Amino acid sequence: MSRGAGLRANTSQFTLEGKPFRILGGSIHYFRVPRAYWQDRLLKLKSCGLNTLTTYVPWNLHEPEQGVFNFEDQLDLEAFLRLASSLNLWVILRPGPYICAEWDLGGLPSWLLRDRNMKLRTTYRGFTDAVNSFFDQLIAKVVPHQFSKDGPIIAVQVENEYGSYAKDIEYMPFIKEALLSRGITELLMTSDNKEGLKLGGVKGALETINFQKLNLNDIKYLEEIQPQRPKMVMEYWSGWFDLWGNLHHVYSAEDMIPVVTEILEKDMSINLYMFHGGTNFGFMNGAFAVGIPAPKPMITSYDYDAPLSEAGDYTTKYHLLRNLFSFYHIYPLPELPPLLQRRAYQPVVVQQHLSLWDILHFADKPLKSERPINMENLPVNHNNGQSYGYTLYETIITSGGLLNSKNNIRDRALVFVDKHFVGVLDYKTLELALPDGKGRRTLGLLVENCGRVNYGQTLDEQRKGLVGDIELNKQLLQDFIIHSLDMKPGFLNRIENLGNWKSMREQLSFPGFFQAKLYVNGSPKDTFIKLPGWSKGVIFINGKNLGRYRSIGPQQTLYVPGPWLHKGDNQVLVFEEQEADGKIQFTSTPDYGMAVDV
């Protein structure tokens, strides 16, 4: 039986198949949730009384190298769409190409920055060519899942909050045309905060608004620019993101529920951003730079204080929202899916360690260069550069004295002389005294990309590593050996199987890798890792990068999905920069640190 008309916005209320329709939506990002749990999270969304799933599409994961596309396993967007359809959920797709999302470079691939003249989110030829190439792949996969083809997609968003960037008036029409010309036929929307509404729209797309606290003037403004059209909050911020070194943001259910109630009473549609945040696995977290002197990276957890927690637990918000949404349904809501079990596994003792200096020859072949080269322009990964992780820059010095970074370190460097740690250079600390010594010594700077800024006016400036010259005693340093350490699975496999791991009885050397085994009897359950006595680094389990940890918090635990474990021995690998405890601990409850109201 063929369907009637899709989502329409011709009057003050949406219609779907000609009948009045209210979007009750929630954002869940497939790339932040282990695939084995997609169904669990979507069922919980449906049971809360929501009828629509909203997701971004991360270009940087789907095209990690230019012309190399990945839509498999964790990135199988079509499987996610089919799952939504099988559960009778509608979908609003937000394909970018820029997505913000507190995600590295707002989802844009770092290889775009190899072009010195790159102008992201404009009609600069280097950018539009790349978008066209990506959309050729992506939109072809999406088109069959549209409402008009019996799929779940009822609307597609054109770019994302462009009104807050607004560098090129021809850009939004270009993105709109890029969607239409490839077969997108469903309702188009844009999404902006109040200020962005002035510049973020494009002819033929419904404008929607993003906020947390309700300001009636903002709703009035939306009405004025779009009389007699449906009003929608595309991002109702159910919580907020966290930054390393800050407190954990919470937005209380008592503050939130009255706002959602009023939005619904005003006959508006709503999408909860986030309904379920999930996790910034790997090195994919973004960074925040608006109104502060230097960027601050996002933490690994994207719990967001959302109605469904990082590990898929119900919260007070969830139950109160479910009660509220139930009044907008004729039939009783589905029963709540059972909670997943968790385990606090016994602590595991670290068995062996390996110094970073002992594994350099297992990384990609180092590059010799007279001047420093930023990560993105290194001739690695089939000439796509290095996207994430660490880069080690080494050069010979013949004296001590004052090392000056000239603010060219992005974002943080551990500094070594002959492999001895001497200090940290970052945005705050630009100078460091190097000890005197005889003869030729090796100066090493291990530079970490802590996460590229994902929002604001500085996207074009997000190159990482050493982005310019550094000086010792006002003399330029030259003749570098550069090691790319992006810690991809192939590299981890090579070092895990080395024969020169040392026992923990031998002197520990930092930075270093630390190996342990977690034995799981019975079927694996979700857990959280905690590392008291450790300082800062990255954790891998069975080759999967769980993300970064830092003792400064706020986050003190890292989520370990049960499906990423298996019965028997599980390989735990920790890369630690500066100090290690002899064991790795587990807990069944997350610790996101001291809380502060948004």
Image: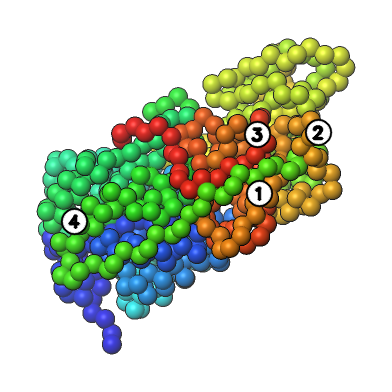
Q: Which residue is painted at 72% across and 15% down in the image?
A: 434
User: Where is mark 4, residue-wise?
Assistant: 324
Q: Earlier in the sequence, mark 1 or mark 2?
A: 2
- Marks 3, 1: nearer the viewer: 3
Q: Residues within 10 Å of mark 3 (few under 14, many from 20)?
A: few
Camera sees residue 305: yes
Q: Earlier in the sequence, mark 3 or mark 2?
A: 2
**Residue 308 at what x, y percent from top left?**
35, 53
Residue 506 disc label:
2
Q: Which residue is painted at 46% across and 62% down in the image?
A: 37
**Residue 366 at what x, y percent from top left?**
78, 41
- Marks 4, 3: nearer the viewer: 3
Left or right: 320, with 297 as reference point: left
**Residue 331 at what x, y percent from top left?**
18, 71
Front residue of 20/251: it is 251
Q: Secondary structure at mark 4?
A: helix
Residue 492 disc label:
none
Camera sees residue 199: no
Disc 1 residue type (three-letter): Val
**Residue 334 at what x, y percent from top left?**
27, 68
Alpha-carbon distance for marks 2 and 4? 60 Å
Disc 3 residue type (three-letter): Asp
Alpha-carbon distance for marks 4 and 3? 47 Å
Residue 572 disc label:
1
Alpha-carbon distance for marks 1 and 4? 43 Å
Q: Earlier in the sequence, mark 1 or mark 4?
A: 4
Q: Secondary structure at mark 1?
A: strand
User: Where is mark 3, residue-wise?
Assistant: 581
In the picture, residue 41 is in which quadrant?
Answer: bottom left
Front residue of 322/425: it is 322
Task: Point out the residue furthest to the bottom here.
Answer: 1
